[in-house]
Amino acid sequence: MEINVRDIFPSEYMLRHVYQEDFEKVKTIIQSVKTFAKSSHQYIYLLDYYNQKFIYTSDKLVAWCGKVCIETLQSDFRFFWEHIPEEDQKMIMEVNKIGIDFYNNLIPEERVNYTISFDFYFRNKHISRLVNHKLTPIMLAPDGHVWLALGVIEMSANKTSGNIMVQKEGKSSFYLYDYKKHSWSEELTIHLNEVEQLIITFSAQGYTVDEIANKICLSIDTTKGIKKKLFKKLGVSSIAEAITYAVNYRLI
């Protein structure tokens, strides 16, 4: 599928003006993101809606895209998009449009409090991975439109692409987008109690069920029972999936 920058940045959503003094703030933001990326296992980038390009991509993301230098990846989206299947490219372009519409319906001060998340397949060296992608506005233009957004990519806990949602930090519900019906619905956020969070956290640290039971002062059978109910609650079938799900959806 041939990608044109206008497909990703439709002209009706483009920023009209950014003041020169605001560009000085961008340098500080880029440096902060660089520092964050060094200590993160995630794939990080900064998207500039004004200049219509990546202005920062972490080394991990560049490595994922194969033999391409950072400057090339940042200046040309095609080197990133060519790793995404055509069906998922179509989905992402729709997500971009409905995401911008969603943010534009919020008051400007609220736009940086929301994150849009979705899953897509990323192919590299004949291996196709389902990844979770989050995009959060971190800087607005003088007219209130989203200027810079922080992108975070990591392995998905789901089994299919899509799973499009928008969530506000600290809110007990989220907005789920039905890609087939092209409509939004509001859903309640899954909540994990303290014991469930501890089981996932200790499992991620490599502890066995017996060791976890001892740490949380419960019997092994009770711990196994809670773990089984937790899998059902999250819609997963393994502790690895539960950990990924909890991280992706900020449950721990």
Image: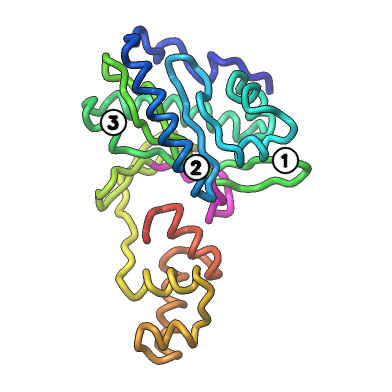
Chain-order first, disc 1 or disc 3: 3
Badge 1 marks a residue whose secondary structure is strand
Determine whether the residue tagged by mark 2 lies in a helix, strand or loop: helix
Q: Residue visible at 43% across and 15% down?
A: 50
Q: Quadrant of residue 232?
A: bottom left
Labelled disc at residue 124: 1
- Element type at marker 3? helix
59 sits to left or right of 171: right
As drawn, the residue found furthest toward the right would be 126
C-alpha distance separating marks 2 and 1: 21 Å
Q: Quadrant of residue 222?
A: bottom left
Local crowd size for mark 2, using a 10 Å CA cut-off: few (<14), some (14–19), many (≥20): some
Please name the amino acid that badge 1 sits on: Asn
> Which of the labelled discs sits on residue 37, or is there none?
2
Tell me the kind of residue under disc 2. Answer: Ala
Return the residue at label 3: 111
Neighbour tally class for label 1: few under 14, some 14-19, many 20 plus, Cα within 10 Å: some
Alpha carbon separation for disc pair 2 and 3: 23 Å
**Rendering coords of residue 136 (x, y %):** 38, 35
Relative placement, left or right, of 199 versus 124 is left
Q: How many marks?
A: 3
Q: At 35% from the left edge and 9% from the top edge, which residue is drawn?
A: 20
Task: Identify which residue is drawn at 48% across, 36% down.
Answer: 34
Q: Is residue 155 magenta?
A: yes
